[in-house]
Image (cartoon, rainbow, N blue to C red):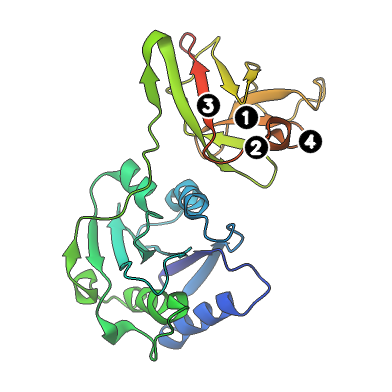
Amino acid sequence: MRIITLLTDFGAQDYFVAAMKGAILSLNSDARIIDITHEIPPQDIRAAAFNLLAVYQDFPSGTIHVAVVDPGVGTARRGIIVEYAGQFFVGPDNGVFSWIREREGSFVAVDLTNEKFFRHPVSATFHGRDIFAPAAAALSRGIALKEFGPAIDDLVKLESLAPKRVDGGVIEATIIHIDRFGNCITNLTRDHFGAGAKLVLNGREISAFRRFFADSGDNHDELFLLLGSAGFLEIAAQDTSAAKILSAQPGDRVIMHAGGVY
């Protein structure tokens, strides 16, 4: 049985997620469907890209990931299927898979145009149910990638995850995601961070580093740095939101003054 994951901005209030699952199960009743999250902020492609990047390596080879955060639904934007590192990604061509592409490098992709694999009639507003879910179900039944449409290689990209190095050991980074706890996740990794390094975000300097999140001996309002489970350097505060303390938002610039080797 193939695993099909779902990641959307649909929430839990309406019928949308259930409709996608119904479309999949109608074509493959043996499919194993796993919800990654349906709480992506509406139309937030970068939040979707980060969450998928953080989790896809936890799944086995052959997993099919359906990501539907699709502010361009009904426009000329393409639907695509991409294969990276033995896993498949189905969704709109709006950059939602581009950070995985940046990490993995090589890929095979098709323009999802073969209407044989669509649910008809196709709604102008719900391609998750009518195009992407049925395509994922067909993939899970062993249909070859080439059957879904012509090969393409000009996929839409988000901005690069790579921080910019400037003179004097300074690195310009970015807040790429803020999680529900208010932790500010940067695009810095262990390779960038050194002993004695400090970050500056919205005029605040953060230099304290923790290996573990909880430390009952410290001030709970203190900002600190830690390497999060997704492999990126995070700015956090124990039992409160670092994002609120810093008035931070995704896309905010972070300046790192580098230290020695950590």
Q: On residue 239, which mark appears?
A: 4
Q: Residue at x 63, y 17 (%)?
A: 205
Residue at position x 52%, y 60% from top? Answer: 43
Residue 36: x %, y % from top left: 55, 60
In the image, what residue type sits under mark 1? Ile
Q: Is residue 59 above or below residue 160?
A: below
Among the two numbered marks 1 and 2 on one chain, the one whose residue lies closer to the N terminus:
2
Q: Amino acid at mark 3?
A: Val
Q: Nearer the viewer, mark 3 or mark 1?
A: 3
Q: Which residue is mark 1?
A: 235
State which mark lies toward you, 4 or 3: 3
**Disc 1 and disc 2 in contact, CB within 8 angstroms:** yes
Answer with mark 3 or mark 1, whichever residue precedes in sequence: 1
The answer to whether residue 246 of the structure is visible from this angle is yes
Q: Indicate the secondary structure of the residue bearing disc 4.
A: loop
Q: Which residue is mark 3?
A: 254
- Above or below — where is 181 with respect to 92? above
